């Protein structure tokens, strides 16, 4: 994983600050209004805001582990850097910052592994109970689906392009994707999406609507994307609007 650009900017800024005369950081200046700032002041403000955003984001990350940044140490480091009174040499600061990045990566990996294990258990328990419900079909691969509206048109094959409306949620109901929210249906080749979709949508007919319960191995597996954490079981409601014919595909290009 690459080092945070903002983190390295912070290191570089502190190093440069140590080499240049600065106004004492203890001197209070009145709050500025953006309409009154010069270009140089805006650029300086952007530098400070970038540092602040980095610290804010890092603190939010650490809260996941039940920890928080020592803000007193951060403020002293900023003040010492600006006044050329740093407790460590510039190369030591770089090493300490890089060590902090490594600690964060390790903690994030540990958390991801824990979440992945928990998601597998939750998913297995959910699917075991869900599969007992009337109307829920479980296929040989472990995909489950429930027909909400029977379609009357054509059924697609894996190599077809389909036009669909859909909504995707996690087991706790969190919505992570929706063509309804975007205000337009999605069009894509059926063999270029997650396995659960490729298999599931082939059970549908045009005009139909189905709810799919997709185990992690047929979804994103151990990959995390957006609100989807590793080994998440996913629920999709899908409307098959149309199986797009090759000539329609070509006409749309």
Image: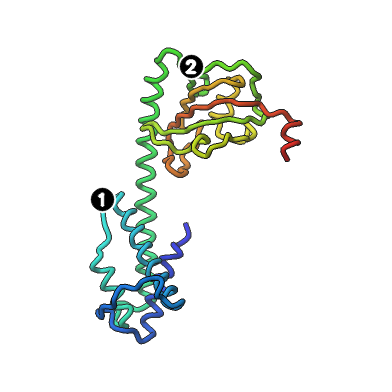
Residue 52 position in % (x across, y down)? 35, 65
Circle 1 packing at 10 Å, graded few (<14), some (14-19), many (20+), is few
Say which of 199 and 251 sits in front. 251
79 lies left or right of 157: left
Helix, strand or loop status at disc 1: loop
Residue 45 position in % (x across, y down)? 39, 72
67 lies left or right of 134: left
Spatial CA span between label 1 and label 2: 41 Å
Residue drawn at x 61%, y 15% as measured from the top left: 152
> Residue 80's mark?
none
Q: Residue furthest top?
A: 134
Question: Pointer 1: what residue?
Answer: 66
- Above or below: residue 179 compared with residue 210: below
Q: Earlier in the sequence, mark 1 or mark 2?
A: 1
Say which of 189 and 107 sits in front. 189
Residue 180 position in % (x across, y down)? 51, 34
Residue drawn at x 43%, y 33% as measured from the top left: 169
63 lies left or right of 201: left
Question: Pointer 2: what residue?
Answer: 137
Residue 32 position in % (x across, y down)? 34, 73
What is the total number of numbered labels drawn onto the structure image? 2
- Above or below: residue 154 compared with residue 229: above
Circle 2 packing at 10 Å, graded few (<14), some (14-19), many (20+), is some
70 lies left or right of 222: left
Residue drawn at x 42%, y 41% as measured from the top left: 229
């Amino acid at each position: 994983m690459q080092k945070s650009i903002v983190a390295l900017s912070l290191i570089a800024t502190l190093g440069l600050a140590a080499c240049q005369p600065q106004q004492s950081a203890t001197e209070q200046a009145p709050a500025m209004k953006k309409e009154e700032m010069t270009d140089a002041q805006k650029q300086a403000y952007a530098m400070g805001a970038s540092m602040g955003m980095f610290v804010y984001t890092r603190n939010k990350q650490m809260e996941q582990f039940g920890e928080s940044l020592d803000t007193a140490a951060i403020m002293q480091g900023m003040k010492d850097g600006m006044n050329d009174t740093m407790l460590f040499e510039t190369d030591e600061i770089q090493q300490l910052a890089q060590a902090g990045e490594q600690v964060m990566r390790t903690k994030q990996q540990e958390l991801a592994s824990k979440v992945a294990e928990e998601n597998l258990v939750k998913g297995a328990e959910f699917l075991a109970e869900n599969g007992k419900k009337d109307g829920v079909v479980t296929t040989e691969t472990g995909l489950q689906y429930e027909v909400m509206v029977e379609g009357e048109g054509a059924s697609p094959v894996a190599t077809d392009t389909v036009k669909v409306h859909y909504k995707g949620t996690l087991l706790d109901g969190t919505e992570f994707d929706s063509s309804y929210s975007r205000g337009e249906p999605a069009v894509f080749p059926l063999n270029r999406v997650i396995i659960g979709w490729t298999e599931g949508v082939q059970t549908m007919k045009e005009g139909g609507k189905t709810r799919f319960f997709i185990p992690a191995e047929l979804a994103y597996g151990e990959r995390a994307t957006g609100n989807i954490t590793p080994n998440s079981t996913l629920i999709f409601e899908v409307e098959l609007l149309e199986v797009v014919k090759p000539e329609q595909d070509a006409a749309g290009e």
